[in-house]
Image (spheres, rainbow, N blue to C red):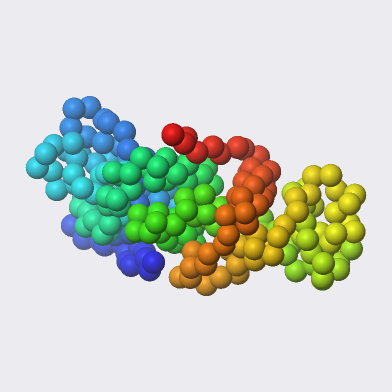
Amino acid sequence: MNLPHLKKEIEGNNMKSIKTSGIVIAENSLGDSDKILTILTPNVGKITCVAKGAKRPKSTLLAGSQLLCFGEYVLRKSNDLYTIQSCDPIEVFYDIRVDLDKLNYTSTILKIITDVTLENQNNYHILKLFLNTLYIISQSDKNLDFILSVFKMRLLKILGYAPNVEQCVNCGRRDDLSEFSIKGNGFKCSNCAKLDKGSIKMTEGSKYSIIYSLKADPKKLFSFNISESALKEFELISRLYFNEKLEKEYKVNKF
């Protein structure tokens, strides 16, 4: 997923506007007709925006002020608050909105995105991963635990928490890497793993999934398949390691 028009400042008539792509990650009502939005942008980070009249049925901002709307926004900044002047929606992820399971997994991803992003921070790689993940959830029938696990492992790499998958984190051995150490931050050989009660045994399928999630081209990140048993290992490792690094537990509300 490419991000067009990352940021462009437009000056004229004694005003300054910013044109940027972004996705709505939170929306709240403001009075009878307005909204306050949180929009994640590639280079400005999270920004708080007022969408005046967005709740009115004939508002030109109606579609662009919906949760998960990805579009191109023209904003006017006043102090630390932005006002949306116009929006050109690109994708609204309708298929996620009408599927309860997909919506629940997306809600968990939204919580994560909200926690790991800041204002005035370059979020290009996080936003790109987020959008690619939403497109896969929306347009494919891939297992949602698989998608979430790949997302978590790749996000950890972006945040600087990638596990060591090249060699045993204890002795440096490059073969017989059969277990994942949560506390040790990566793979361990079978001998070193005997002394690590918290290590998790990996099959070749789960080990491949971890390595691929960290190293794959962003455009091909989700384009692999694993067995059901390997997925259980992969999901467990990515969940525990992710929670350890972010020091918080993220749960999906499943029905």
Q: In which quadrant is the N terminus drawn?
A: bottom left
Q: For residue 10, which quarter of the picture?
A: bottom left
Position of residue 137 in the picture relative to residue 207 (left or right): left
**x, y percent for residue 178:** 78, 61
Q: Quadrant of the C terminus?
A: top left
Residue drawn at point x = 49 percent, y = 64 percent: 222
Q: Residue at x 25, y 44 (%)?
A: 65
Whether residue 73 is visible: no
Q: Percent from the top left, x then y, of residue 59?
A: 13, 43
Give the residue furthest to the top: 31
Residue 92 seen from this side: yes
Q: In this rendering, is residue 72 above or below 176?
A: above
Query: What residue do we see at 54% from left, 47% from top?
Result: 116
- In the foreground, 113 or 181: 181
Q: Is residue 195 left or right of residue 166?
A: right
What number of labels is visible? Answer: 0
Q: Position of residue 142 (x, y in %)?
A: 44, 57
- Give the camera-side residue of 14 and 3: 3
Q: Position of residue 91 (x, y in %)?
A: 28, 57
Q: Is residue 214 left or right of residue 220?
A: right
Q: Residue at x 28, y 43 (%)?
A: 98
Question: In this orientation, which residue lies closer to the viewer: 162 or 196?
Answer: 196
